[in-house]
Image (cartoon, rainbow, N blue to C red):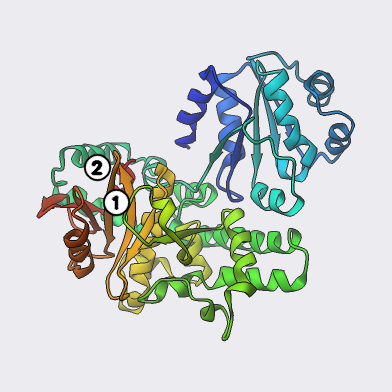
Amino acid sequence: MYRKVFDYLRKWKTDVYRKPLIIQGARQVGKTYAILQFAKEEYDNVAYFNFQTTTALNETFAEDITPSYLLPILSHISGQTITKSRTLIVFDEIQLCERAVTSLKYFCEEAPEYHVIAAGSLLGVAVNRNRFSFPVGKVDRYTMYPMDFEEFLLAMGERALAERIRACFRENASMPSALHIAAVKLYRQYLAIGGMPEAVARFADTEDYIQVRHVQSTILMDYLDDMSKYQGSANEIKKTRLTFSTVSVQLSKKNKRFQYKIIKSGARAAEYENAIEWLVCANLISRVYRAEQIEKPLENYKDIDDFKIYLSDMGLLCAQKDIRPQDVFFMETELADFKGGMAENYVLLQFLCSGFKPFFWRNDKGTKEVDFIIGIDGKTIPVEVKSGENVGSDSLHEYIRLFHPAYAIRISERNFGFENGIRAVPLYAVFCICP
């Protein structure tokens, strides 16, 4: 399956300022597959090392972490001749070996002609927990997410439709009615299936949603197991699991600001902020802060106590609460309170895949709110998300009146269009929006 990370990796390979690369992301998002596929296409051979399955590697790195010492030993262990620029060295599950992470500094300084990629599912958690000597400034970093909607379309054999969507976005021209309907149907399929590569591949092979749900449930169980393995106390494990299980409930509320009381009656930030931080570092949830002022840079004006959280994958979000695919396809009335949150979660994931760091806006009275604020071509652009075709929004108009943006974006199931300074973008075309 095509992944957009391939384009990044090809540029990384030929970059004169290339450093060892760390690819991080949640488990099962396709990191190892992408690296090995890239190695197969671009290198003579690959020297692959997995710190989870080959525990003896830890002993090797405990002795010496300079490239001159490591390279002959790694060549022997892998059974591969490691050649400058022609062999890709891969360290998988590198978070399990602190010394291996630190060794990347020396590969950067002493052996830059060797190409090294490291992958870690819980690297952020491990670094925070063990206080690694992290090679700051000596590595390139890339975060992988589940497949975005365009990657999903390609996996479903819909390349022509994906190209037509991009063309209509560029020209701001309406999609033909039949194609618009087909794209909306595929968007709703994506909500149910999500972007985890195994779930997408299973559906592409079988078109069986029961098998897809089995894959999703297994991934969720693996995530819960990780919460047990990588946290110290039973109390912290319990808090993290409780927090993770309430994401969909938070998204069902009209006011989607994260509320600790939803986790547990009387819960406070001091009790659960570590659990939230763990889930963010593990790439299982994303956190979007409120911008107190609409001024550049927005990062300087974020309210660290006012944020919303979203799950890392749409399919997992549906599986977590046992939402039937049929309910998503037809947007049953029973989903009324959840449809808006589901659409927001979807848009946020597409934005993250495109490289955005979104914020959101709420007025001082708390009566008006714009779902996302993003930067496009140096402009601060408000984005309103609607789950269906009803696009009325007092909040977006209030934002426009107060801040006079160059234009605004409204995302919904309606076709492309532009009116009164608001650009209409269908939900299925969010992947076309770029920084």
Closest to the observer, 250 or 319: 250
Q: Are marks 2 and 1 in contact (CB under 8 Å)?
A: yes
Q: Is residue 380 above or below residue 378?
A: below
**Which quadrant holds the C terminus?**
top left
Instruction: Report whether 294 appears left or right of 214.
Output: left
Q: Tell me which residue sits at (78%, 21%) in the image.
A: 67
Place of residue 369 in the rendered image (x, y in percent of width and height, measured from the top left):
30, 68
Q: Secondary structure at mark 2?
A: helix
Residue 71 image point, x, y percent: 79, 20
Which residue is denoted by mark 2 in the rendering? 165
* Along the line of sight, the residue nearer the viewer: 48 or 101: 101
Q: Is residue 147 or residue 245 the one in the foreground? A: 245
Q: Where is residue 47 shown, x and y percent of the image?
A: 72, 25
Along the viewing direction, whichever of 185 and 276 lies nearer the viewer: 276
- Is 7 located above or below residue 341 in the figure? above
Find residue 199 and report its horizontal and vertical position in percent: 51, 52
Question: Which picture quadrant has residue 65?
Answer: top right
User: First in sequence: mark 2 or mark 1?
Assistant: 2
Q: Which mark is residue 188?
A: none
Residue at the outermost left position = 420
Number of marks drawn: 2
Q: Viewed as shown, does residue 298 lie left or right of 73?
A: left
Q: Which residue is mark 1?
A: 428
Left or right of 292 in this view: 116: right
Amino acid type indicated by mark 1? Tyr
Mark 2 Cα shell of 10 Å, populated few (<14), some (14-19), many (≥20): many
Q: Residues within 10 Å of mark 1 (few under 14, many from 20)?
A: many
Compared with residue 10, is residue 345 higher up or lower down, i.e. above or below?
A: below
Where, by quadrant of the figure, is residue 167 drawn?
A: top left
Residue 190 visible in the current orientation: no
The answer to whether residue 121 is seen in the rendering is yes
Q: CA distance from mark 2 to mark 1?
A: 8 Å
